[in-house]
Image (cartoon, coloured by chain):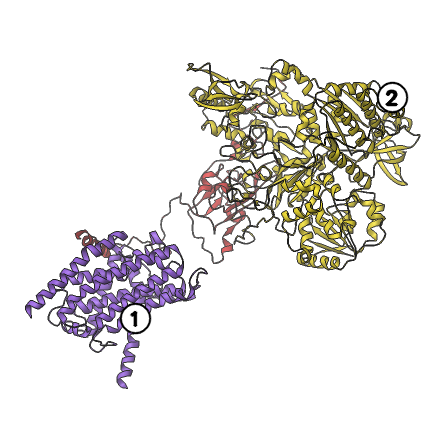
Chain colours: A yellow, B purple, C red
Amino acid sequence: MKVKITIDDKIYEVDQETNLLEACLSLEMDLPYFCWHPELGSVAACRQCAIIKYKDDDDEKGKLVMACLEPVKEGMRISLQAPQAHDFRAHNIEALMINHPHDCPVCDEGGECHLQDMTVMTGHNYRRYRFNKRTHTNQYLGPFINHEMNRCIQCYRCTRFYNDYAGGKDFDVFASHDSVYFGRHEPGILENEFSGNLVEVCPTGVFTDKTFKKHFTRKWDLSNGPSICHNCSLGCNIIAGERYGSLRRIRSRYNGDVNGYFICDRGRFGYEYVNSENRICIPLKIENGESSPMPREQAVREISEITSGAKKLIGIGSPKASLESNFLLRQWVGSENFYAGIPANEGKLIRQVIKILKKGTVRTPSLSEVKGYDAVFILGEDVTNTAPMLALYLRQAAKNQPGEVAKDLKIPDWNDAATRVVVQNATGSVYIATFHATKLDEIATQSYYAHPDNIARLAYEVMAEIEGNFKDETKVEAMDNANQPLSSSIAKAMLAAKKPLIVAGTSLYSEAIVQSAAAVANALKEKGKDPGLVYVVPEVNSIGLSMLSEQFLEDAFDKTDSADATIILENDLYQRKDKSSIDAFLKYQKNIISLHYLENTTTHQANYVLPVGTFAEADGTVVSNEGRAQRFYKAHQPDNDIRSSWEWIQEIMMDKWGSASFDEIVSSMVREFPELERVQDAAPSAEFREETQKIPRETHRYSGRTAEDADKNVSEPKPPEDRNSALSYTMEGFTGVPPSAITPFYWTPGWNSVQAINKYQIEVGGELLGGNPGIRLFEPKETTDLDFSDHIPLQFSPKQDEYCGLPLYHIYGSDELSAQSPAVKERVPEAYIALNDDDALKNDIREDDMIEVSVNGEKKRFAVKLHKGISPGILGLPKGLTETAGTEFPFTATIKLISHE
Amino acid sequence: MNETLKLTLIAIGILLALLTIAAGLIWVERRMLAAWQDRYGPNRVGPFGILQVVADMIKMFFKEDWIPPFADKSVFILAPAIVMVTILLSFVIIPFAPGILVADINIGLLFFLAMSSLGAYSVVLGGWASNNKYSLLGAVRGAAQMISYEVFMGLSVMGVVIMAGSFNMTDIVLAQKNVWFFIPQFLGFVIFFIAGIAETHRLPFDIPEAESELIAGYHSEYSGMKFGMFFVGEYLGITLISALITTLFFGGWLGFGFLPPVVWFLIKMFAFILFFILLRASLPRPRYDQLMSFGWKILLPLSLLNLLVTGALVLYFT
Amino acid sequence: MFSIIRSLWLTFLHMFHKRVTIEYPEEKAPLPPRWRGRIILSRDPDGMERCVGCYLCAAACPVDCIALQATEDENGRRYPEFFRINFSRCIFCGYCEDACPTYAIQLIPDFEMGEYDRQNLVYEKEDLLIAGQGKYHGYNYYREAGVDVGVKGKGEGENEDKPVDVRTLMP
């Protein structure tokens, strides 16, 4: 509700739910602050946002208060500019600066430092304090984060984020008074998956990006692309910054619907594969095992000669490639010869998910909406490792039920300190059913470890409990109610909640889990609840790819009639399926054309390799797990032959198709696939102009234009033109707030840090001006013909000497590309095999013993790790590591002890 | 036959001499300006920097002769040629010394006035063909200025004509045997001189090409040798006006005997050229409206008065 | 009218004045030490590069003719990996020197940089770095800063207290 308040003798309308600081910032006023963060709330620790509050219209003196702890009240009168308030703020900064070191030139935060901005804003210039500065020693915090404790101004934002928000355990505040120390109890790797956000949360340079430090560039010198994180299926919005042809850093790009202010560490630090030495930069021709570079024109000519006369071509798409690249490949080879480059069991599961998204009645919330649910039931998904940001927001959802108590006490949402006193460490209803212990167990009301089939059976029991009177008698027969009383307590919790949320996914390759989750959600919906249903899928464009094709890798392998050429798009097949079947397939292909970023086993088998752009050098659209189509843009135009895959395909097919722009490709895709129609609205078209100007990728302060390439040639070339988007590769263009989908960076006068985002939002912490970017392709239907309530699987029971192999996911390692970034690589675990304690004891196996696993006659050796949570009869094998790449799950295996450690 | 050959030689001789003088003037002007501004001016190329002109000419010839794509090509090329042709043709009537002149025609002075009117075309066409707003502004200013000042120029020399009783230049020189006309026709001389500056749009009346307002006025778009023609045309103009002043008011080749007549002519002519340069060194440019009102409100009445008084006196004494 | 003639006369008289021109190659003008000529990179009193690669000079440059890349040695001491000035663009405004927080970049009284090939006006770090301290003596940025990059330890600076012991129980 809007109320009127008087600020400095002017009347404004503000939201009643907020505090005065948020209200002032939403009114675009410059009020300095440090400890407040729109996502973390107010604690009034920094004493910076002081204002004068007047009792009534006659009060001339007023009272100095902290704006962040003062709720908005109808008719109140305050002053920002009153001399007492202004002086207080200036003196406060001066006091903070007493111990702040003379580091700005070597500090990575310099130039985008909130402390710098606030110091300038309050007008503090000269140090008057004659005495010494206090110093701190730093800690090693792992490969991601650099620690420089001298710079700290004790705002407490770091612990509030790391411990309270992200659930970190290995970080805290130490010591007292002016020697307060933020760090670990001893030097070591910061374990939390969201530690990278400290870089953006810290108002100064205590925590900085260690990967960025190695190739440091100031914010104003980066050429930025509004992009989408390609490391999992959530589609978090990111900003990719480039300088001198290499990708320098990833920053979170605010999207109020998706990732909000934060991104996970895989997304933030897993970018360096883009700059890898293994990067393919020029077209290669491989003959007799020897690869030789060739000019672009020649490569295009030779490939178009091979393919134009061909009777049959095979195209293998990729869930890592954009919709446009996959679509153009499909057009090139023909729909009957286009195969989604994923195994059929995965593909069919994803198509099942799409079907539920399309036809179901239950809403699939956007990532950020997850925070609003108050009871969670997770089915089979290790969310922290398969979709990390979802885990972060599930943690927030878990705080909602205990938060009700604070609401009853009339404590507003934003009052973090008071809410925390009330809530303490209490969590709401969170039930987790997985086959092994997961990190989220710590917030779980109860965890249940079992084989996927049994997890599904639990879900069906819950469904039956929710339905109460067992609508269908046949179901009862299938059930043995083995999981009482767990299933009834879950059902009760779900029914007691205002907004229950069911989380499932494809990670265990279990159709039963996917179906049972829908069944539970449907049952809740029928009970008049407002449930949510989130499916996690494997990759960034898994949904998009599976919408384009229903043929998968096996279908391609089965076709024995040989093709004249096989085009493999942004896909390392050896990551997808076992080596022998890929080898068998590739051996019979005459001309293999691989479009990829990095050298890998597949590119080594190819006859032609074309260098294609990663998310940083390509344009495209991807569809996230919720069915949100989002555009990503090049951060820069590489000066080598790296192009978007669709640009390559277009160039090869130039004679036949002519040269179509990106927008034209999208519209021809929409003609072919009407259900993708809204993809066109995901971002402004290439013709879009703001005040007749393009949106510059570079800031107006971009430096070195006339010198950066002067070593090669002193005459500066014309900057490249971007005909595929409304963005330009230069610093010239529109300088205001651009449309949210094509915002390359945040900057407003006086606000150089990420906090400038306040001015890009309609209301602080809310929607971006012009709406949050991205378009949801699916909305829930009124009625549905989907009914999975009788797809109950059989009970899984462990067999003697035969184990079921299931994938264990690792945030660092299970994603093939991010794992090749040096910093992430340090965090990738050694390959191992996880075993239940009892199973180990039975076989006389101890921790770290070497055992041999044989799958279909193929033997591999791994060290053993004993997982307490893992259920009997199951082997856990990390997915996607170098040693385990291509393993198909679930598998049946026998084990043999090789040696004791 | 011999007579034709002689005339041809004289014509070619005068042409070459004039072009050399005009080119040399570039150096002279730079050196003199420098001298009046406490500098040295070009002093590096050749003795006293005299070969600077040669260096400049070489540069001018080798510069890209660019015609802007938006210009009217044929007119653009024609304009600088008109300057050269009209001014060089005007020299036809100048008697440098007894016998050293190209055409002794009885309408000599009228021929000069006709040619200088034609000269206005070069400015107008050059500015118009450039298709550039500054050029066009310069051209419009130039046209107005040249047409206006031609009126007073014509009127101011009428006194001389009345006194000499002829338009023929040789006759005018010979009529000054006793007294140079600048004494009886002092007002006429001053007006003619001022109008002459305006005709050649030299400083302080270089309003058509005022660089602080119009870049380079009507020849902003010109480069290479076409610009060179405008440039040399300006110095030819100075030479022409100086030669005319010498002829009309300072007794032409008439001198004091110990030097050949042509040398007397040249000495007088150079004195006026130097005065032109001195003007450039010392006077600021008036505003355009000041220039026009000065012409029409002061020079026109004065020249009419001069003509009236001269006519009356001549009638009275004869 | 009279003033015009007077100014003509006064101008004419200048012909007999002394020339102010200094005939440059034969005769050199005295340049003050703060003359803004060629740009150099200086070293600190310990003989190490002063430049810390902060990019402020590049940001201040109105013609964007400075490009550099910062890097670090094994101690974390930051220095430029490359430092390039395109003197064919430089306007010698001296903003870079003003912006430099470490006295590294300095403009010196040398301007004789003419080249026949424009490419030769691109100066790399090797061309810019001098052996001495330039105009400002005795300043070593890393002694003043809070970071420990092998120049001084934490708390060893002149205006610094010893590092806090977070485990002490003393108030």
Residue A889, label in figure: none
Q: Kindly identify which residue carries mark 1.
A: B88
Amino acid at the residue labelled 2: Ala
Based on the displayed image, in which of its 4 quarters is residue C153 positioned? top right
Q: Is residue B242 above or below residue A71?
A: below
Based on the displayed image, in which of its 4 quarters is residue A494 positioned? top right
Please tell me whether mark 2 sits on a helix, a strand or a loop.
Answer: loop
At x 51%, y 22%, the residue is A49
Based on the displayed image, in which of its 4 quarters is residue B118 positioned? bottom left
Residue placed most toward the observer, A414 or B5: A414
Instruction: Tell which residue pokes out farthest to the front in this image.
Output: A783
* Circles 2, 1 touching at the beta carbon (< 8 Å): no
Q: Is residue B9 above or below residue A239?
A: below
- For this view, does B168 lie left or right of residue A521? left
Amino acid at the residue labelled 1: Leu
Q: Mark 1 lies on which chain?
A: B
Please tell me whether mark 1 sits on a helix, a strand or a loop.
Answer: helix
Q: In this view, does A848 lie above or below A85?
A: below
- For this view, does A82 lie left or right of residue A883? left
In the rendering, at what x and y percent does residue A106 appear? Answer: 55, 35
Q: Kindly identify which residue carries mark 2.
A: A482
Q: Which chain carries label 2?
A: A
